[in-house]
Amino acid sequence: MSGRIAPRSRKETRAAVLESLLRSGGAFRPLIARDTQLTEASVSRILAELRSEEIVEELRRPAPYVGGPTALVTLSNDIPVAGIELSNNRLSFGIGGLGGTVDYVERLPVSPQLRQEEFEQLFSDSLATMRRWTGTRGIAIRQAAFSIPGYSRTHANPIFPWDMERLSGFLGDALEGVPLAITNSVIAQAAFHRYSNVAAYPAEGDHLFLFVGHGVAGVVVNETAPIDAFSPFELGHMVIERGGLACRCGHKGCLEAYTSLRAISTIVGVAESEVLQQGDRFIDLLDLGRDIRERLRERLFLLGLGVGNALNLHPVSSVVISGWPSLMSDADRAAISAGIDESLLGGFDAERLKLSFIAPSIGNDPQAALYYAAHCFVRAGGLEAKAEPQAVLGENA
Ligand SMILES: [Zn+2]
């Protein structure tokens, strides 16, 4: 990764090696050394340490070239992390490994105006169920992550206007010593795409990542910075029509009220819960008539207006969109470029602005939070969360 500053402390060097493995899904030593800007000797020393702690594994593989390395290093599949997401009108709990495997999922429907005390009750109930599951298997969760729309470390949450101090206090108590990170949903989505299928990701370098799901939010991805350093921006709450459609934030005319999955599920006549079940095939399963397609194109146009406005404030030369627009045809998606053309200073020019689309994995919550938890585990160098018996999320823990 060019531009990345060579790591120094023990924690930083461990984190760099682990992040490289999380990103690549497994690599030979020379590649890890190149990626982390460490010497092969340092990499070997760190890997020996991580292997003794059972955080990484080495698998024998045919050498990639004559005389090349034969030990493929991967993250261990036995580091359980927990992901919890508040998204799609449901509270989802999941347990999985660092490599994206999901071993346990529970999803509970919640109201869009979920109150904090209701949340705490539901969370406690779901956590008790999860503990029974981990308890009978003797599993110790090493890192947990909770993603919530509208979350910011510095500002009040407009979507869930809860007392954030109370929230972190509650979660800390409930999770009893398991390291926990709270993040914005779009940051978790960015983690999902950074780590789940690197080869398919269409952008390199700094770009705007836009998630168009149940909510609409963006984040400027800086390729050389860790994901937890990103600041989300709530593009979905850009008012594009004065006195327009009601938004869940309490305002009227927000971009989200026109372009979210919820907004378009009413246009296509399929309940959002049904859409979540059908996942990324949901558009293909529909027989979109001309009128519906036209209405969807109008919504894509509005999305383009919002993107152009966002780029006026924060210019980047590449935008990656994940969400239902990614499932539409090129002809439909031309409406987004047309919208950008009307709002972006200087207009839309494919030479200067790369617009790419990536499959959203609709309905896969809490996979994004699980990837964020994996991210937090590796960022801490695998050091903060030692598996100790008392940290087991067991029934009587
Ligand atoms: Zn809004």
Image (cartoon, grey):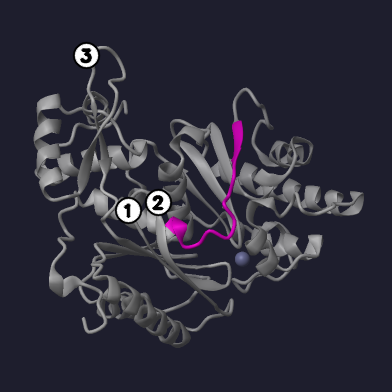
How crowded pointer 3 is (Cα within 10 Å; few <14, some 14-19, many 20+) is rated as few
Which residue lies under the disc numbered 3? 67
Circle number at residue 374: 1
Rendering quarter of residue 390? bottom left
Residue 125 appears in which quarter of the rendering? Answer: bottom left
Mark 2 crowd level (few <14, some 14–19, many ≥20, 10 Å Cα): many
Q: Please determine whether, in this image, residue 184 is positioned above or below residue 205.
A: below
**What amino acid is found at the position of numbered circle 1 in the picture?**
Ala
The residues tagged by marks 2 and 1 sit, at their Cα atoms, a distance apart of 9 Å
Question: In which of the image's four quarters is ligand 1 placed?
Answer: bottom right
Residue 79 is situated, as x and y percent measured from the top left of the image, at 26, 56
Q: Cβ of disc 1 within 8 Å of ligand 1?
A: no
- In the picture of the structure, the residue carrying the numbered disc 2 is 100
Q: Is residue 386 visible?
A: yes
Would you say the residues marked 2 and 1 are in contact, meaning their CB atoms lie under 8 Å apart?
Answer: yes
- Quarter the N terminus occupies: top left
Whole-percent x, y for residue 39 in the image: 14, 25
Kindly state the secondary structure of the residue where label 3 is placed: loop
Q: Is mark 3 within 8 Å of ligand 1?
A: no
